[in-house]
Image (cartoon, rainbow, N blue to C red):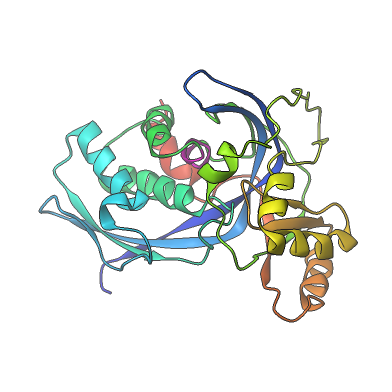
Amino acid sequence: MSGLIAFPAPAKLNLMLRVVGRRDDGYHLLQTVFRFIEYGDVLRLRVRRDGVIARLNPVPGVDEADDLTVRAARALQTATGNRLGADIDLEKRLPMGGGLGGGSSDAATVLLALNHLWQTGLSRKRLQALALPLGADVPVFIYGQSALAEGVGEELTPLTLPPAWYLVLTPPVAVPTVRVFQHPELKRDSEKVKIQGFSVPRGNDLEPVVCREYPEVARHLEWLNRYGEAQMTGSGACVFAAFADEEAARLALAACPEGMRGFVARGLDVHPLHGLAEGFDG
């Protein structure tokens, strides 16, 4: 499709996720470590002169009005008074309900890319503020580097993490985030931990609930645990384990039982579009 420009929307992993409290408005207080990986969706965008935001391909199960990519583009239009529009083509590679941040990453990529293409000039901090109403995970993709996230996910502190390759398994179920956080058995009183250097304590407070409700997640996690400390990312369903090199991760993927699916990806220290906002960061 002529004129479309491709932009990556990488997945994220939660290397640790703790629920440390709950606000009066029902939002949960978290402590989590985000890391991007070199695998994700692809957004192809084309600037329009008529101001229309048009989705070129449907996303199964997602109405256009609810599509985070469309909402992100319209939010940027409204915030800046911009008169340009955009065609949006989404190549979906990340599973929905997988805990890999696919929808959030897609929205962030649209904000970063259109802020650049439209030359609307919003700083990274302003883009993060615009991103938060779209979803708690969207700001970290704008932030663009490995981070400790606290609060409801908006308080971000940069982290330096050791190199790693990851095997990510994708159980054939979609886990609704809201259902997990509303579950009466969810642990909501974990102690905050202090992260020092490369040391990130593992664990995901949502994992026990998801494993009880979704046996396929538990089965994938049990198999992957033979390669080390495997855990779930986000609210599931995907599970992952870290490896020292690509070869070891690919050997593990090749050994998966029939019917198990997944992919291998390198950990990223910086979002591939991080530089797009630098010109507006003054």
Q: What range is drawn magenta here?
A: 137-142
Q: Which is the main secondary structure of the residues drawn in magenta?
A: helix
Q: Which quadrant of the view contains residue 221?
A: bottom right
Q: Is residue 173 magenta?
A: no
**Numbered-mark total:** 0
Q: Residue at x 72, y 38 (%)?
A: 205
> Is 135 placed above or below 90 here?
above
Q: Residue at x 36, y 32 (%)?
A: 130
> Is 274 placed above or below 3 here?
above
In the drawing, does residue 126 fall left or right of residue 242?
A: left
Q: Furthest-bottom residue in view?
A: 258
**Quarter of the image with the C terminus in it:** top left
Q: Which quadrant of the view contains residue 132?
A: top left
Q: Furthest-left residue in view?
A: 50
Q: Residue at x 49, y 36 (%)?
A: 136
Q: Nearer the viewer, residue 258 or 210?
A: 210
